[in-house]
Image: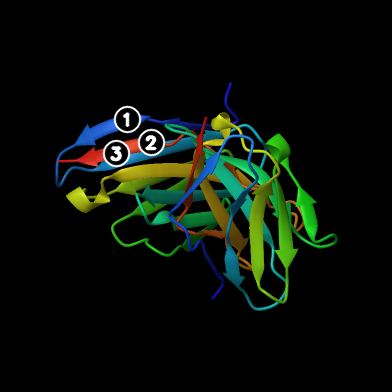
Amino acid sequence: AQSVAQPEDQVNVAEGNPLTVKCTYSVSGNPYLFWYVQYPNRGLQFLLKYITGDNLVKGSYGFEAEFNKSQTSFHLKKPSALVSDSALYFCAVLQAGTALIFGKGTTLSVSS
Amino acid sequence: DADVTQTPRNRITKTGKRIMLECSQTKGHDRMYWYRQDPGLGLRLIYYSFDVKDINKGEISDGYSVSRQAQAKFSLSLESAIPNQTALYFCATSDSSLTGNTIYFGEGSWLTVV
């Protein structure tokens, strides 16, 4: 079965610094990978996805993610963090024929 | 108006009671899902439906049932609620294209079982 792992429960970064939120995956076949963000008391919002093509995927709010097949990773990145980026971030993989399978989430805290 | 609407947004119910969470969508998607979110556990799939006549169990379907009343409506029922079903529940939708398959979420329904 497909799965994703987010090894960090929390990531702390200072405003203006680059940020990385890590995700590794385990799939059979081609991976379809997603990142979602959840702000307090809100639903999940789609950030970006990798289906095929370029390994660097650009998404909403200046976020991007790098697909690395050899390392089975799909890390979320942003060159310059904002305080408003503070939220809960989920990596997910599409399990063939079913639905998205989510990681446990990583809390991003950006300090001013 | 939200594309994916969940009702109620908050509910407190007693152990043993039946509770229904409703979901409707205006996105015209054929696929609908129910997830449950617990702190530290992420989102776990309860049930999913690829069309009106298709219902499938997810990872944690025990204690839950669903009904797909129409393409736009997908309800989740707890026949006899228990305290460990206290959680944030999300309905979601997606289209059926392989390269699409972006899932859109409702705002969530907080359920507390006392």
Q: Residue A74 or A52: which is nearer the viewer? A: A74
Type of the residue with mark 1: Asn
Is residue B95 visible in this depiction of the protein?
no
Q: Residue at x 62, y 66 (%)?
A: A97
Q: Which residue is mark 2?
A: B109
Type of the residue with mark 3: Leu
Is the residue B108 above or below the residue A4 in the image?
above
- The answer for how far apart the CA atoms under marks 1 and 3 are is 6 Å
Is residue B28 visible in this depiction of the protein?
yes
- Chain bearing tag 1 is B
* Badge 1 and badge 2 both on one subunit: yes
- The answer for how far apart the CA atoms under marks 2 and 3 are is 6 Å
Q: Which residue is mark 1?
A: B10
Circles 1 and 2: CB distance less than 8 Å? yes
Is the residue B47 above or below the residue A60 in the image?
below
Residue A14 picture location, percent across and down: 55, 38
- Chain bearing tag 3 is B
Callout 1 environment at 10 Å: few (<14), some (14 to 19), or many (20+)? few
Count all numbered tags in the image, as a single digit. Answer: 3
